[in-house]
Image (cartoon, rainbow, N blue to C red):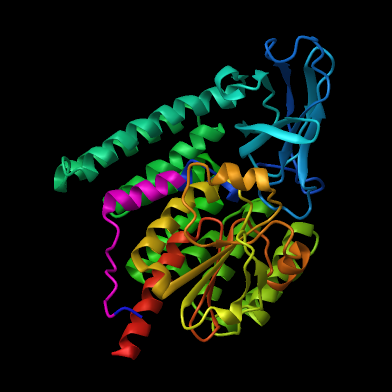
């Protein structure tokens, strides 16, 4: 263990905002309710178009059998692994319907004869027909996508690129203090204006989320004001906006203020889906605050109130497993893998290091952005203080090679097929991709972190490292 104290302000404000930006451009709205029916909570859209092959490669003119598929990257156990699959006819045309739970960015894989040749990201939103045209093998260069949601998202991405240029300027030291604060407020306004122009679109709601995050810590009063507007104008964002408000109240005014806020939401007349997610936020807050007895009581009440919703029951059973088997202070389940380098590794062989275990899909858009943050963490603490083990579900050698083509591999990854994925999902109660566990030097769980909860893991990691250092000194 190195004799140094962790700097709790390790990230500058603009770096922290960039982290929000990278995360929010992906799967943030996995929390939204989407207005689906209780009988069938799933939605879908039509995806159609034409994929051909460069005539310099294939002169037959027969473009049949080109495969297009979208994987269930959200890890929803109620959906199959593939939420969209079709093949082209001889002219390269295709048409089929997807089935998913929430609007989000999904990865479309295009291949032939069982081999994935290219992948592209698409926005899927309910009843927004997507038409695409592409030519193999240069899909990225030839791709044309036509749909209202995807076209709006292109505009939204231009906003993101503009913000990124500002952040780069700030990191170079050209924007500081009041000038930086004013610039961030300006960009928050730009995002908010885009939301107000396109309030019911995926890109518009993403933009509203960014507008709020950019205000956090700079103008909390305006952030809360806009949160209240969102609660009225975009009920589908209520579960998200309540989480952000809870985070603000808990950190600025204490746990009781956050609990009072959630109690006020309980008194509102909400649809069942929104009520369910508010209750989930409350139970998570109690669990994360180690108020485990009350969390258990609220969970029992939750199971009774939402017993008719299959997804609610599955969530409750999953959290029950966290409370009884995977709570902070409990021994972490055993993990044994074969690494990409052929090394046999298990959790007992790590030694006296802090351990991070992450379960993901390597093609997951959120994970790809979070990976750079983990790289920064590993570079700072190195192999001396922390060990990271990544278990990529469903990965094949081609996917792994493509992932590391433009990324460093600094820690150990499990080899495809070396683990029993079903058993690991049960042992570690994996409901969301990615899921991470932080484990102390005694092999006990410090915390479990799902999806976007990377910032929380960093905070707990810093506390753990500082505690270990104090014990050494």
Q: Is residue 48 above or below residue 321?
A: above
Provide residue 136's location: percent of width, then percent of height.
67, 20
Provide residue 279's location: percent of width, then percent of height.
61, 64
Q: Which residues are magenta?
A: 3-22
Count the marks: 0
Left or right side of 220 for 112: right
Q: Which residue sits at x=23%, y=45%?
A: 171
Q: Residue furthest front?
A: 342
In the rendered image, which quarter is residue 376 located in? bottom left
Q: Which residue sits at x=51%, y=64%?
A: 262
Q: Which residue sits at x=53%, y=41%?
A: 234
**Which quarter of the figure is the N terminus placed in?**
bottom left
In the rendered image, which quarter is residue 158 located in? top left
Q: Is residue 327 visible?
A: no
**Which quarter of the figure is the C terminus placed in?**
bottom left
Q: Which residue sits at x=68%, y=61%?
A: 431
Left or right side of 312 for 200: left
Provide residue 308's location: percent of width, then percent of height.
81, 60
Provide residue 418's location: percent of width, then percent of height.
72, 63
Along the viewing direction, whichever of 175 and 349 lies nearer the viewer: 349
Left or right side of 321 for 120: left
Along the viewing direction, whichever of 135 and 216 lies nearer the viewer: 135
């Amino acid at each position: 263990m190195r004799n140094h104290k962790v700097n709790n302000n390790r990230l500058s404000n603009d770096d922290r905002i960039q982290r929000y930006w990278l995360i929010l451009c992906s799967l943030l709205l996995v929390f939204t309710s989407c207005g689906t029916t209780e009988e069938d909570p799933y939605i879908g859209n039509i995806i159609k178009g034409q994929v051909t092959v460069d005539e310099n490669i294939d002169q037959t003119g027969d473009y049949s059998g080109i495969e297009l598929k979208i994987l269930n990257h959200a890890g929803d156990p109620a959906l199959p692994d593939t939420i969209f699959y079709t093949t082209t006819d001889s002219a390269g045309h295709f048409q089929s319907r997807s089935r998913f739970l929430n609007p989000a960015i999904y990865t479309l894989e295009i291949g032939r004869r069982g081999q994935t040749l290219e992948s592209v990201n698409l926005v899927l939103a309910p009843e927004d027909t997507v038409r695409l045209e592409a030519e193999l093998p240069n899909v990225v260069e030839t791709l044309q996508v036509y749909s209202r949601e995807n076209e709006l998202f292109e505009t939204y991405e231009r906003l993101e690129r503009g913000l990124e240029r500002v952040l780069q300027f700030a990191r170079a030291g050209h924007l500081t203090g009041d000038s930086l604060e004013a610039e961030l407020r300006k960009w928050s306004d730009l995002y908010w204006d885009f939301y107000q122009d396109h309030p019911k679109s995926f890109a518009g709601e993403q933009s509203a989320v960014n507008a709020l995050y950019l205000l956090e810590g700079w103008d909390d009063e305006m952030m809360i004001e806009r949160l209240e507007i969102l609660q009225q104008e975009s009920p589908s964002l209520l579960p998200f906006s309540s989480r952000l408000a809870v985070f603000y109240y808990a950190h600025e005014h204490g746990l009781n203020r956050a609990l009072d806020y959630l109690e006020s939401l309980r008194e509102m007349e909400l649809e069942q889906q929104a009520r369910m997610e508010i209750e989930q936020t409350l139970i998570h807050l109690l669990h994360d605050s180690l108020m485990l007895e009350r969390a258990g009581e609220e969970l029992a009440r939750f199971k009774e109130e939402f017993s008719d919703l299959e997804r609610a029951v599955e969530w409750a059973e999953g959290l029950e497993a966290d409370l009884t088997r995977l709570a902070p202070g409990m021994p972490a389940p055993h993990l044994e893998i074969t690494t990409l380098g052929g090394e046999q590794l298990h959790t007992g062989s790590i030694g006296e290091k802090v351990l991070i275990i992450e379960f993901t899909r390597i093609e997951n858009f959120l994970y790809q952005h979070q990976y750079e943050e983990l790289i920064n963490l590993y570079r700072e603490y190195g192999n001396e203080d922390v060990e990271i083990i990544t278990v990529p579900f469903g990965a094949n050698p081609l996917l792994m090679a493509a992932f590391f083509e433009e990324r460093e591999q600094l820690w150990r990854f499990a080899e495809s097929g070396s683990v029993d994925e079903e058993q690991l999902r049960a042992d570690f109660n994996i409901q969301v991709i990615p899921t991470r566990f932080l484990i102390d030097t005694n092999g006990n769980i410090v915390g479990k972190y799902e999806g976007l909860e990377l910032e929380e893991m960093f905070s707990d990691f810093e506390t753990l490292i500082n505690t270990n250092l104090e014990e050494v000194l």
